[in-house]
Amino acid sequence: MKVLLGFGGSQASLEALERTVDRAVAAGDELTVALAETEGASHDELADRVEDAAEGTGLSVDLREIEGNHGSELVALAESEGFDELVLGSNTTSPMGKITLNKTAEFVLLNSHVTVTLVR
Amino acid sequence: MTTDRRYPETVSGPFEVPPVAFVDREERDIEIRPHDGSETEYEALVEMYTAFDPSDRAQGIPPGKEERVRTWLDGILADDCLNVIAWDGEIAAGHSTLVPDGDDDYELAIFVLQDYQQAGIGTHLIESLLGYGDEHGISKVWLTVERWNHPAVSLYEKVGFETTGAESFELEMAIRIDEDDN
């Protein structure tokens, strides 16, 4: 299966990265990681983290850099290049503990024609 | 959370201040009191939430398993939060809570056990929590609610909440219960 992971360096996206790498190794998925630069992490820093996560697994991960509106960029990439699944980490909660979706996750869920997995 | 939240200009209230005692529409004697911090009340809340119907869960809370209920309660019963509980004798029938959002404002949530719904408890519970909050110097309160949950939205509107954000999956509503310096 051809899997695209959106990765912005948040705790949730790190967990999604680990899980997606593990799954790709086990299932023989072809993994591409879209690096979504944020204020906290540059494309290079994100790429280093992905390489760390994949190190020793034998998995070769294709890296892409996305700019601008991360949600629409992810959807466009997933659809234009024939991905089977789009994976995102999302575990933001309100002070009360209510589950909330960030703008990227919300856009992707509403707009993607490719199957989406949200990792909690 | 975001710092650019809008609040109504108008101050709502004043609201009743707990303890509040009343007879609900099912003729049960209900008393609403602030949480006293005791183990007994904590365990009664655990019991209420583990019995909670999953279909009444909102955005993942209350959590489904007892262990997670306890972790969640530890957070919202902390010293900087305000909690009131509706009691039918020893049974916790409802609970509402104000949790600081790190921005000097508070997020509100309210839960009423299924057997006690549609009996007028929710209105007293939310009003007495707002009264209790006002007494503790809180001026601005917000919440989110799933947009299809019409009974909840009506309840919030009735006490003075206004819709302040409608662009997400959930509606965001806010109320002003006291003047502030902003």
Image: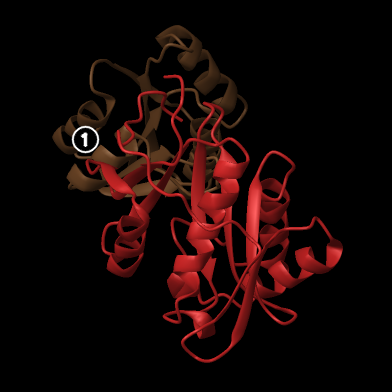
**The one of B145 and A42 positioned closer to us in this rendering:** B145
**Residue at left offset 29%, top offset 49%:** B171
Q: How many marks?
A: 1
**Residue at left offset 21%, top offset 46%:** A110
**Residue at left offset 32%, top offset 60%:** B158
Instruction: Give the quarter of the figure containing the C terminus of chain B.
Output: top left
Coordinates of residue B119 in the picture (x, y in percent)? 45, 82
Q: Is residue B58 above or below residue B9?
A: below
Q: Dot 1 lies on which element?
A: helix
**The one of A5 and A41 positioned closer to us in this rendering:** A41
Q: Is residue A102 above or below residue B25?
A: above
Q: Is residue B146 left or right of residue A9?
A: left
The residue that mark 1 highlights is A75
Q: Residue furthest bottom?
A: B27
Q: Is residue A5 above or below residue B96?
A: above
Mark 1 Cα shell of 10 Å, populated few (<14), some (14-19), many (≥20): many
The chain containing the residue under callout 1 comes to A
Coordinates of residue B159 in the picture (x, y in percent)? 37, 56
Under mark 1, the amino acid is Val
| Colour representing chain B | red
Q: Is residue A93 visible?
A: no
Tell me which chain appears brown: A
Q: Is residue B118 visible?
A: yes
Coordinates of residue A42 in the picture (x, y in percent)? 43, 8
- Based on the displayed image, in which of its 4 quarters is residue A82 positioned? top left
**The one of A84 and A43 positioned closer to us in this rendering:** A43
Q: Residue furthest left?
A: A80
Coordinates of residue B133 in the picture (x, y in percent)? 57, 45
